[in-house]
Amino acid sequence: MHNSFRLVFLCLATFLFMSHELFLKTDTHFLEINKATQLYLLNGTFDTSENAITTDRIINSKIIGPDYLMEPKEGQYEIKNKITYLNFATGNSGTYVAGVSTLPRVLEMDAKAFNAYLEHEGLETTIADRKKQDIDNTGAKERYSKHVKTLLQVGEKRTIDFMKPLGYPIEFVPMNNPYDIKMGDAVAFKLLRDGVPLANHIVHYSTAVPGQDTHENENSTKTNENGFVSIVPNKKGKWYIATIHMEKRNGVEVDYESNWATLTFEIK
């Protein structure tokens, strides 16, 4: 029933979620050493960008590899066709992690839209709290920010640099290398909230399917009591894992604050 609801909701309110979802991608996650290349931010769905992220909203951008640390400057970004591109050059061979964090924005929704959004994302605790407080028929102001990462294999050598946390408010930290597995093997992650493992928290994951909306094929699972979660890629192509952490705020500015995390990689 949950999957059916997600399909119906996507048809009715795609515009709402397109304003939220953010992914850091590249044409191929398998790159050459010491070569100029591009990453890009898709602000919409895993397949389509509805609008660009302006550089004044980007903070804590990092690319980490073996003996390599880049913190991109404003001049390295460019915006074309509703997509924000990041230009950089790779270094030595190894498995890199790249990330971008954004400054928060506020979104106001009526009760129907907000409740549907909570249901769509599996935010069970917030749903239960709203019902308990008898506020599930009221709208909400939400302050949200996005924290997105991607894994890159540069050259042939596998290294552990991709496992380094970037210090984001919420982030997935890989526990094994997706570029060193066979089809059918699991890829494991630790979900951190302010550096602390986030237990029993719902996450979503999917892959690009030609001719289909990736989110229509989305699967859901939960982290365990230690904040670990694993998924089993069963197709070649680009994959993502994503989640939202929401907290109640009692201030006059917003009712809730959410932090969104995605991580992308490719199975070859």
Image: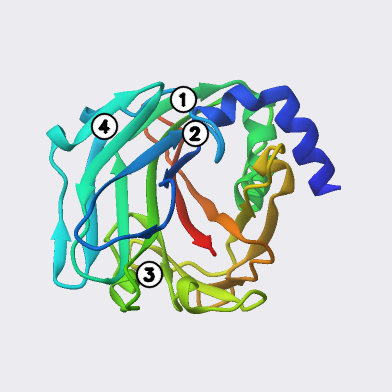
Measure how far apart labels 1 and 2 are at the Cα level.
10 Å
Which residue type carries mark 2? His
Classify mark 3: residues with Cα within 10 Å, few (<14), some (14-19) or many (20+): few
Q: Earlier in the sequence, mark 4 or mark 2?
A: 2
Measure how far apart labels 4 and 1 are at the Cα level.
15 Å
Residue corresponding to mark 2: 20
Q: Earlier in the sequence, mark 3 or mark 1?
A: 1
Q: Earlier in the sequence, mark 4 or mark 1?
A: 4
As drawn, 8 above or below 87: above
Q: Earlier in the sequence, mark 3 or mark 2?
A: 2
Q: Secondary structure at mark 4?
A: helix
Please provide percent x and percent y for residue 59.
22, 42
Measure how far apart labels 4 and 2 are at the Cα level.
14 Å
Residue corresponding to mark 1: 107
Which residue type carries mark 3? Val
Residue 135 falls in image quadrant: top right
| Residue found 67% across the figure and 76% down from its top | 184
